Image (spheres, rainbow, N blue to C red):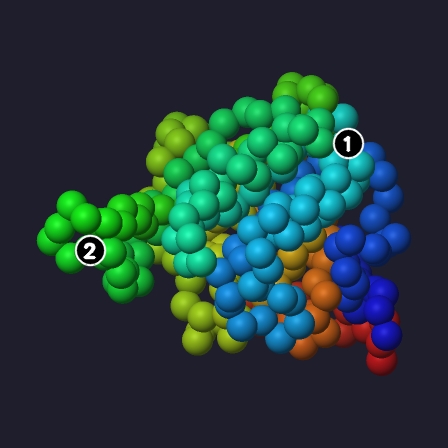
Amino acid sequence: MKGIFFENERLKIINDDVLITEEIQNNSIDLIVTSPPYNVDVKYNTCDDNLSYEEYIEFSKRWLSRCYSWLKDDGRLCLNVPLDKNKGGQQSVGADLTVVAKKIGFKYHSTIVWNEGNISRRTAWGSWISATAPYVIAPVELIIVLYKKEWKKTSGSRISDITKEEFIEWTNGLWTFPGESKKKVGHPSPFPIELPKRCIKLFSFVDDLVLDPFMGSGTTLIAAYLTNRRAIGIEIDPSYCELAKKRLIKEGKISQKRLFIANG
């Protein structure tokens, strides 16, 4: 049954479709940190990750429109997406999704380049040692930083917990840290906790409400809880909701007795 999977006083997991859920109030979210499906045929349990590019852009438009409504006027969105892709034809994913977001109404702030260092994924060079048709593939991902109406944040506790050293390092728009192991987490495309942790501490105040509309294995919620924020995750697949709950108990050190399990 769709709806609230579990919640406590600071965390909530919603087992539902981001496009139709009615569990999020408009103008209530301070920060969205998410990594949507990349449309590169990843084998999720539920989500179709093999749309045509036109269908993918339309899907992105629909979910981004919902996120725009959910954000406060000074709310921000940190969107983790590929720079580009070549599976099924070369596409400028990061640039295209930025244009989609701006058409919806989002304002552009900046783009952080995440140097994941995953060169080992490289399997195709096009025409080998030839100018005929070489493939150029950058082993990086993007975190596109957008906001709703006002960049200056005036709502919330106005309490920042970022250190001087973190601020200096993280405001440099090239972040270098490794990705996360699929096998270790048990999800086909997890991101490392370092990614949402940096976004949360840099772009939100203590006690702000953080949302991940594609929660997956729950990494954003763990990062939010460990940095004293409140958080909501939306996930269409119940097995990933269960995985996120288990990770919150293990990695977030949340007492299982304090969780309200909505579905028994």
User: Badge 1: few (under 14), some or many (20 or more) residues near its Cα, within 10 Å?
Assistant: many
Q: Which mark is residue 72?
A: 1
Residue 149, horizontal then vertical, whole percent: 71, 22
- Residue 28, percent across and down? 81, 38
* Few, some or many residues within 10 Å of mark 2 (<14, 14–19, 20+): few
27 left or right of 11?
right
Q: Nearer the viewer, mark 1 or mark 2?
A: 2
Residue lying at the far left in this picture: please name it. Answer: 129
Compared across the picture, whether 262 is left or right of 82 comes to right
The residue under the point 51% across, 66% down is 41
Label 1 sits on what residue type? Answer: Lys
Residue 159, placed above or below residue 263: above
Task: Depth check: give the residue in front, 260 or 161.
Answer: 260
**SS at circle 1:** strand
Residues at circles 1 and 2 in contact by the CB criterion of under 8 Å: no
The foreground one among 154 and 132 is 132
Q: Position of residue 72 (x, y in %)?
A: 77, 31
Task: Tell me the CA gap for discs 1 and 2.
Answer: 49 Å
Location of mark 2 (residue): 127
- Residue closer to the observer: 116 or 39: 39
Give the image location of residue 35, x and y in percent. 56, 51
What quarter of the picture does the N terminus occupy? Answer: bottom right
Residue 147's place in the image compared with 89, above or below, is: above
Q: Which quadrant is home to the C terminus?
A: bottom right
What residue lies at 79% left-to-right and 63% top-to-bottom? 16
Q: Residue at x 71, y 57 (%)?
A: 233
Above or below: residue 16 compared with residue 86: below
Quarter assignment of residue 203 = top right
The numbered mark, 1 or 2, whose residue comes first in the sequence reads: 1
Residue at 58 percent of width and 25 percent of height: 108
Q: Give above or below for 161 relative to 63.
A: above
Query: Taking the image as drawn, is residue 208 in sight?
Result: no
